[in-house]
Amino acid sequence: MKMKRLGALMLAGLMAISLTGCGSSSSSGSSEKTYIIATDKTYPPFEMENDQGKLIGVDMDLIRAIAKDQKFKIKINSLGFDAACTALEAGEADGVIAGMTITDERKQKYDFSKQYYETGVSMGVKKDSGIKSYDDLKGKTVVAKTSTAGLAYAQKIKDKYGFNLEVVEESTFMFEKVKSGEAVACFEDTPVLKYMIKTGELDFDTPCGNENPAYYGFAVLKGENADLLKKFNKGLANLKKNGKYDKILAKYE
């Protein structure tokens, strides 16, 4: 009886060692680290859906190429700009790439990567609207999207030029208000307006050119995910060196 019990104990011990070994092997051979990346819903040419419903654009192609270069995996959550920032601050995302302009104010909350795209702000108006300068906005309604460089610039000049400012949550709402005549102009990032005018999505003019030159960056919560930020910067440098960065930009110009 004792021999049977001893044999059973030895067998159980061997099984435990075997199972532990299997677990260790699985852990050591685990897949690449997966990061949750939050982004905007529609912000061409940086975030947009193709005909198959896949999220594409400069930001999407760039983060995927960097992940491949640096051997990590990503899960992209398309939330909208404000919601993406909220998810990052709540710990529900590891990083945000969403055509985010690097500003001193944002640096208080986020750590940014090296700049990856030059941007600025332009005023968009319907063709033949009669709006030729900021002076023509006096007493009229102008629209901008929440939490954007366009909104910040519009807020900065609205008292000087005497226009009313309306704020919306999504770019599509902003453009529709100008198209319908509810607003005479919008303020948006220059690359977005240029792309949508070029592709025929907007029948707009940009009479005042590019204002407030700035740069986009990839963001993580301040003091967090330093390793991810390091990988982004290293991958970005590699893509610029091997020509893939220029190919991504050229694809959407």
Image (spheres, rainbow, N blue to C red):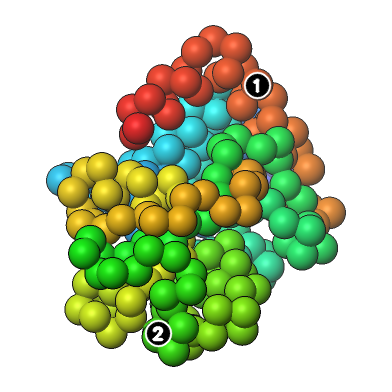
Residues at marks 2 and 1, CA–CA distance in whole angstroms: 43 Å
Q: Is residue 43 left or right of residue 178?
A: right
Indicate the quadrant containing the C terminus: top left, top right, bottom left or bottom right: top left
Depth order, front residue of 93/155: 155
Depth order, front residue of 234/183: 183
Residue named by callout 1: 237
Query: Does 178 sit above or below residue 211?
Result: below
Answer with mark 2 or mark 1, whichever residue precedes in sequence: 2
Query: Does 82 sit above or below residue 188?
Result: below
Q: Estimate how packed mark 1 is, as few (under 14), some (14 to 19) or many (20 or more) residues with alpha carbons within 10 Å.
A: some
- Position in image of residue 16 (x %, y %): 67, 39
x 73%, y 62%: residue: 106
Indicate the quadrant containing the N terminus: top left, top right, bottom left or bottom right: top right
Q: Are marks 2 and 1 in contact (CB under 8 Å)?
A: no
Indicate the amino acid at tag 2: Thr
Element assignment for label 1: helix
x 29%, y 50%: residue: 196
Residue named by callout 2: 141
Q: Residue furthest top?
A: 242
Q: Estimate how packed mark 2 is, as few (under 14), some (14 to 19) or many (20 or more) residues with alpha carbons within 10 Å.
A: some
Q: Quadrant of residue 114?
A: top right
